[in-house]
Image: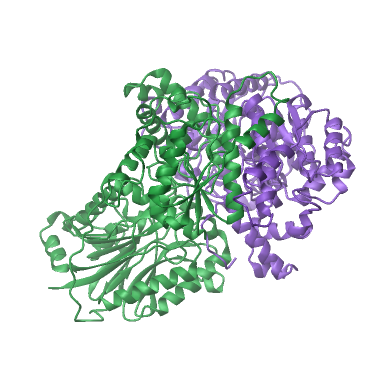
Chain colours: A purple, B green
C-alpha cells in the first residue's frame, strides 16, 4: 500500500518569541523524524507567533524572523517541513518592503520553496490586508513521490483557488497551516468546511492549527486530516499541544479520482501558473514504526468553552510573565467561576483571593467567598472597605451637599475595591483578574475603574446565562464541586446598596442575553428582535444601554473571546455615535 | 471667459446622525445656490459621517442612509451636488450585501449617477477593506458644459487611475470628496500631492475635506482648489466649517493642455471603462454674484496643533452630549494646558477644576492651580485626599506589613484622585478630561485608574516638549497669558512622594521625546536610534518602558491624534509580546 506519513505539529507559539518558537518547532521536527514522518507541518506564522500585528511594520522584526527561519531550515535534515514565517523577498539584503504571510517548504535541511498566502482575511479580528501583499501561483511539491499542495489558513476557507488549481495539478494532499481563533462550536464548522474541500477536490487535507492563547484570542488546535471522501481520518486534541501523526492511504485517493467522472471534466483557468517542484521520489525512511489511529473525541459544549477560558487565562498570565493572580471574591457566581478557572489554569498556589466587604455586604456573601476559597484551596485575604468608604463620603460631603445618594455613591465602593486590589497588584506583582461577564460589559452594569479594574477579564465574552452553565459544568466534573451551591442558587446582586438585586436594573438574564446576542452578535434591528418575541420597550432600553456604554468597554482589559463576536477588535464601533435607528 | 463656479462645503458631520447631517448639507446647498454655484461638493460619507466603522455592518444603518440620501436628492433642485453616502445597489429592495464608499452625483433634484471609491485605505487608522467593495469604471460628467470627474479621498492619493483616466477622457475638473484626518503638518503634504495631480493631469482639483472631531480623529478642513499648473487657487480655513466658493477659469485649463505636448501622447489603458454622462450644457444661473478670491492663510505650527486639540475636545464633548467637563488641576503644566484648551473649546462656564492636594503637594502647586483657575475664570473645588489616603494605608497595613513604601503607595494617591473626580462625574454628569501627555503614555509614567481615569485624554498624543511649546504659544496670544509662568518654569513632578521629580525616573524630556518619536512613530531599531546620537542603555531602557506598558495604553481613554502615529487604532501591537530584538 502506497502511503505518506504526515505529522501535524499543533504547537503553542508566543508572539515575538522568535528563539522560543524556533526551539519548540525543532523539538517537534525531531519527534516527527523519530516517528518516520515524511512531511511535518506547523501553524501559520510559526516563527513569529500569530497574530504579530504591527510588529510586522518594524523592519528589524521582519529581518530577525528571516534569520530565525534559517535556524529552522538547518534543523530539518532528513525530513520535509512546512513552517510559517514572514517572507520579505531579498530581505537579508534589504528587500523591497512587500511582505507575505508565508509557508517555508523545507526539504532535507534546505529551503526548497516558499508559498505566499493568497487570501488575506480582513474581517472580524483580522487585519491582514494592513500588512501583507497577496501571493500568486500554484506550486505543487513532489514529496516521497506524492503530489502535495501547500496553502495557508484563509486560502482554504473558500472554494476555488489555490486549492482547486493545486488539486487539478495532481496534488493528492493539501497541507494547510492555520492560525484559526476559537469561538464556541467553531471546530465543527471547520470540519464541515474541510470535509467539503477534501471531497470536492478529491484530496487529503492536512489542517494544522495553532493552539494556545494570545491576548484576546484562543487558538483551539483540533488539527485534523480529512480523506478524499470527506471522512475524518485523524484529529488532535483541542487546547493542547500535540504531534498528530497519520498515514495517508494514497491508493484511496487515486481510487476516489478514478471513480469521480465529474472531476475529470474540470480545467484550471490558471494551469499556466502551476509550478511543479520535485523534492523526492521516495521516503527518507522506508521502515516506519507502526501507528495507532488517533481521533480525539470532541468536547461537550460547556467543557469546550471552559477549556478555552482556562487556556486563554493560562497563556495570558504566562506569556506576560506573571506568576500569581489576585481575584476579588464577592461571594457571587462570576468571581467564583473566575477563581475556579484561574486555579485550573495556573494551580492554586498561583491564585490569591481578596474579600472586601462593605456595609452592604451580606453575611452570606462573605461566608460563600470563604467557602469557595477553602474548596479551591487558595489563600483568602479579607480587607474591609468601610473605613475608606466613610473617609470618601466625608471629603465629598460638601461637594455632594443637597444631592440624593445614587450611582456616584455606589461606584465609590466599587472603586475603593479597585484601588485596594491594584495596590496589592502593584505591591506584590500579582496580575488582577477581573470578573465581569458579557451581559454586564454589554449593558455597562459594571464600574469603570472599580470592578472593571485589572489586567485580564477572563469571562468578559461569557453571557451571564452561560456563566451559570459553566459553573454547573465545573461542579459536575470528577475533580469535585468547587463552587458552593448557594452561590449558584441565590439571586445575583452587586451589593452596593441595601437589598439591591441585578434584576432591579436589568431584565431577567435569559431575556437579556437573547436580546444582546441578536443585537451585538447578529446585528439585528429593533424590529427583527421584536419579531423574535421580545417586548419593544425592553429591546430599545437594552440597545440604548449597549450603545451608551461603548466608552466603558473601550477602557476594559482584554479577555478571552469565546463567541463569534466579542467586544474589542471584533466589534469596532464609534463612541461619539448618534445613530438611533438601531 | 468660460468659468465654472464650484462650491466646496466643508462641513462638520456627526457619525450616525443621519438626520442632522442631511439637514446641515441642505443648508449648505441652499447657500451655494444663492451664490450661483454650479456644482457643490461635500465631504466623504456626508450622510453617515466618517468613519462610521462597524455601524456599516448593520443592515438597518445602511438602509437608513439610503433613505437619508433621498432627502438630500430632493433638496438639490437647480444645482449639481456631490454627496458622500454608502451605496448598496438595489438596497431599498434588499441589496446583495456589497456596499461601496460612494459619491452621489445629484443634478437638479434627481440622482444622476453614483461613483464608487476605488482605492480603499487599510493602513494607519483606516480599515476600509473591512467594509467596502472597490468600485470600477471612470465616469465623466458634463456639468454646465464642463467635463467633471468625481472621485473619493484615497482615490487621488496615488498617481494613475481613476484621476488619470478621467482626465484623459476630457474631465477638466476633478471633484474629490474627502475625510482626511489631521496630523501636524498634513495640510502641506496634501497641498503638494494635490498640486502634483492637478499639474500632471492638467486639471482643476477641487478637494473638499471634512472638518471636526470624531472620537480620536480630528478632520482639519483646509479644503482647496488647485489649478492645472499646480497653483493654489482657493483655500478654506482649517478647523472651521466653511463654504468655499470660487470660479474656475476653464480657458486656463484648455491653454495648459494646448501647451502640454507630453500629455497628448498618453492613452488610458481603460478607455473602454469610461462613461460619459451628460448633465447640462450650460449653467442654471447665468448672472452670478461677484466673488472675492479666498485663500485662507496657513496656521503657524503650534497654533495649528492647538486648534486641533480644541476642535477634538469641543466635538467629543458636544457629540457625546456633555455640557460640562471636570479637570484635576495639579498646578503642573499638563493639567494647565488641558484646562486652557477646554476653556477655549467649550467656554469657561463649562469647565470645573478640582484641586486634590495630598501630604506631598507643595504650597507652590496649590497656589499655581488657584492662579490658573482665576486667570481662566473657572470654578475651582478643593478636596484634600489626606483623610482617604490615611484610611487606605490603615486597611492595607497588615497586607503590606514588612514591605518598603514604593509605587504601590504612590499609585494609591493617584487612584484616590481618580475615584474622587469620577464621583463628581457620576454625581453631576460632568465629563472627566485627563491630562497625561504622550511621553507619559509611552513610558507608562502615569497611574492606570488614577490620573489616567476619565473620558477624554486631550493631550495623550502630545509629547511633553510640545506641551511646553503649546503652553508658550497659548500665553503669547492676544487673549492673554492664561498659564502662570511658574507652571512653565518649574521642574515637572508627580508629587507622589517627598521631593519627587519626573527626571528621577525618566531621561530629560528633550532626549526622551527624540527616542520615542524614532521608536514609536518611525519604527526605528535600537541600532538606528543609537546612530542618531543617543546612549544605547538609555535607548534600550526607554524601549522596554514602551513595550512593557502597552497594557496601560489599552485601557486609556480616547484622545486627539495629532502626530502621524498615535497610540490606539493607529498602532496595533500585542500585549503578550516577547519580541526583544527591538
Total marks placed: 0
Q: Please state the horizontal and vertical placement of residue A466, each as a whole percent of the image.
A: 77, 49
Q: Quadrant of the C terminus of chain B?
A: top left
Q: In which quadrant of the rendered view does residue A272 lie?
A: top left
**Left or right of residue B250, residue B378 in this image:** right
Report whether residue A10 is seen. no
Q: Nearer the viewer, residue A330 or B396?
A: B396
- The percent position of residue B356, horizontal first and vertical second, equals 54, 40
The location of residue A97, given as percent across then percent down, is: 38, 35
Question: Residue A33 appears in which quarter of the rendering?
Answer: top right
Give the camera-side residue of A544 and B344. B344
Quadrant housing the N terminus of chain B: bottom left
Q: Nearer the viewer, residue A95 or B457?
A: B457
Vertical position of residue B144 compared to residue A261: above or below: below
The foreground one among B475 and B562 is: B475
Left or right: residue A235 versus residue B29 is: right
Is A480 placed above or below A500 here? above
The answer to which quarter of the image holds residue A291 is top right
* Residue A47 on image: x %, y %: 54, 28
Q: Say which residue appears at 39% left-offset and 74% top-offset.
A: B26
User: Is residue A165 left or right of B230 when viewed as pictured?
Assistant: right
Q: As displayed, is residue B570 above or below residue B315? A: above
Q: Is residue A140 visible?
A: yes
The reply, left or right, for residue B555 in relation to residue B8 is: right
Amino acid at each position: 500500500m502506497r502511503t505518506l506519513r504526515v505529522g501535524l505539529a499543533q504547537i503553542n507559539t508566543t508572539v515575538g518569541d522568535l528563539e522560543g518558537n524556533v526551539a519548540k518547532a525543532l523539538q517537534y521536527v525531531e519527534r516527527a523524524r523519530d516517528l518516520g514522518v515524511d512531511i511535518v507541518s506547523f501553524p501559520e506564522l510559526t516563527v513569529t507567533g500569530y497574530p504579530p500585528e504591527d510588529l510586522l511594520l518594524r523592519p528589524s522584526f521582519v529581518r530577525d524572523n528571516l534569520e530565525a527561519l534559517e535556524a529552522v531550515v538547518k534543523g530539518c535534515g532528513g525530513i520535509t517541513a512546512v513552517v510559517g514565517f514572514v517572507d520579505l523577498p531579498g530581505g537579508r539584503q534589504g528587500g523591497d518592503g512587500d511582505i507575505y504571510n508565508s509557508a517555508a517548504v523545507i526539504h532535507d535541511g534546505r529551503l526548497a520553496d516558499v508559498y505566499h498566502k493568497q487570501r488575506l482575511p480582513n474581517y472580524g479580528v483580522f487585519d491582514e490586508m494592513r500588512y501583507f501583499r497577496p501571493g500568486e501561483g500554484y506550486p505543487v511539491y513532489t514529496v516521497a513521490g506524492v503530489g502535495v499542495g501547500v496553502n495557508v489558513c484563509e486560502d482554504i476557507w473558500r472554494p476555488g483557488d489555490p486549492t482547486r488549481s493545486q488539486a487539478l495539478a495532481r496534488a493528492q494532499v493539501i497541507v494547510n497551516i492555520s492560525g484559526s481563533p476559537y469561538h464556541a462550536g467553531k471546530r465543527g464548522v471547520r470540519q464541515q468546511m474541510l470535509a467539503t474541500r477534501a471531497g470536492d477536490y478529491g484530496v487529503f487535507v492536512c489542517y494544522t492549527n495553532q493552539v494556545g492563547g494570545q491576548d484576546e484570542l484562543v487558538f483551539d488546535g483540533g488539527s485534523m486530516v480529512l480523506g478524499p471522501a470527506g471522512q475524518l481520518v485523524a484529529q488532535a486534541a483541542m487546547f493542547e499541544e500535540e504531534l498528530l501523526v497519520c498515514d495517508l492511504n494514497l491508493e484511496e485517493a487515486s481510487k476516489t479520482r478514478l471513480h469521480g467522472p465529474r472531476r475529470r471534466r474540470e480545467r484550471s483557468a490558471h494551469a499556466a501558473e502551476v509550478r511543479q517542484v520535485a523534492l523526492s521520489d521516495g521516503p527518507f525512511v522506508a521502515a516506519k514504526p507502526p501507528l495507532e489511529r488517533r481521533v480525539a473525541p470532541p468536547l461537550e459544549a460547556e467543557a469546550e468553552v471552559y477549556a478555552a477560558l482556562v487556556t486563554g487565562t493560562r497563556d495570558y498570565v504566562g506569556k506576560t510573565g506573571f506568576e500569581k493572580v489576585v481575584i476579588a471574591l464577592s461571594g457571587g457566581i462570576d468571581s467564583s467561576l473566575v477563581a475556579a478557572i484561574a486555579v485550573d489554569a495556573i494551580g492554586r498556589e498561583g491564585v490569591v483571593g481578596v474579600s472586601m466587604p462593605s456595609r452592604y455586604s451580606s453575611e452570606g456573601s462573605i461566608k460563600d467567598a470563604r467557602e469557595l476559597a477553602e474548596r479551591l484551596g487558595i489563600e483568602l485575604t479579607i480587607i474591609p472597605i468601610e473605613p475608606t468608604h466613610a473617609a470618601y463620603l466625608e471629603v465629598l460631603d460638601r461637594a455632594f451637599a443637597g444631592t440624593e445618594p445614587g450611582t456616584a455613591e455606589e461606584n465609590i465602593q466599587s472603586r475603593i475595591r479597585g484601588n485596594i486590589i491594584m495596590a496589592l497588584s502593584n505591591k506584590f506583582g500579582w496580575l488582577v483578574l477581573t470578573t465581569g461577564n458579557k451581559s454586564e460589559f454589554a449593558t455597562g452594569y459594571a464600574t469603570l475603574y472599580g470592578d472593571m479594574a485589572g489586567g485580564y477579564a477572563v469571562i468578559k465574552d461569557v453571557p451571564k446565562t452561560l456563566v451559570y452553565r459553566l459553573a454547573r459544568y465545573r461542579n459536575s466534573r470528577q475533580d469535585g464541586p468547587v463552587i458552593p451551591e448557594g452561590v449558584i442558587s441565590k439571586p445575583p446582586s452587586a451589593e452596593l446598596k441595601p437589598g439591591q438585586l441585578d434584576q432591579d436594573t436589568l431584565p431577567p438574564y435569559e431575556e437579556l442575553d437573547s436580546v444582546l446576542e441578536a443585537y451585538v452578535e447578529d446585528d439585528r434591528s429593533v424590529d427583527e428582535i421584536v419579531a423574535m418575541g421580545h417586548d419593544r420597550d425592553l429591546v430599545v432600553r437594552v440597545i440604548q444601554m449597549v450603545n451608551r456604554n461603548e466608552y466603558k468597554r473601550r477602557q476594559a482589559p482584554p479577555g478571552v473571546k469565546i463567541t463569534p463576536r466579542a467586544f474589542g477588535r471584533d466589534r469596532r464601533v464609534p463612541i461619539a455615535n448618534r445613530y438611533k435607528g438601531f
